[in-house]
Image (cartoon, grey):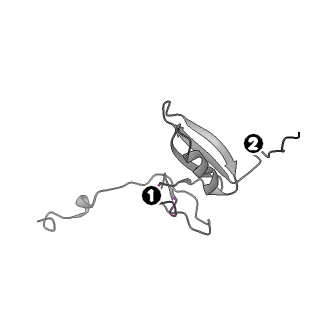
Amino acid sequence: MKCAKFNVGDKGQRYETHYIHVDTKEDLVFGWSNEPDKLAAAADLMPSAESTYTLDRETKHEWTITRFLRNAPFCRVCGIVRLASEKNKPCKGPTKMRGMESSLTTEESK
């Protein structure tokens, strides 16, 4: 009986899927693909995966998908939502978040 030939390893694919191990909190590589969501969905099913994200090697975004927002992947670094065309501009790095209360003046809050 012959075993099927698998195309494994990093062969220059655009996306690299990572997962965070539940116990050790290590950031581990799960695999590589040219389709961003399929490997992330498979990695998300592993009991040892606390969370998963997919690194886009072209734009440097780290796309993550929550179980509640499967249709809206967003970058866990800058917060931008991935376009369906996958033609986002490069990641600009971490953003600063501020609460709504800090944007109100003291007279508006009364």
Rendered position, 27 above or below 100: above
User: How many residues crowd around disc 2 within 10 Å: few (fewer than 14), some, or many (20 or more)?
Assistant: few
Q: Quadrant of residue 38?
A: bottom right
Decide if residue 59 is in sight here.
no
**Which residue is label 1 attached to?**
68
Q: Residue furthest right?
A: 1
Prevailing SS of the magenta stretch? loop
- Marks 1/2: CA–CA distance: 30 Å
Q: Position of residue 105 (x, y in %)?
A: 18, 64
Q: Is residue 50 visible?
A: yes
Q: How many marks can you see?
A: 2
Front residue of 8/46: it is 46
Using residue 4 as the reference point, say whether residue 80 is left or right of it. Answer: left
The disc placed on residue 36 is none
Quadrant for residue 84, please give it.
Answer: bottom right
Does residue 100 appear left or right of residue 27 in this picture? left
Residue type at mark 2 is Gly
Q: Can residue 49 be found in the magenta stretch?
A: no
Residue 9: mark in rendering: 2
Query: Pointer 1: residues within 10 angstroms few (<14), some, or many (20+)?
Result: few
Q: Quadrant of the N terminus?
A: top right
Magenta residues (range): 67-73
Single out the residue that lies furthest toward the front. Answer: 1
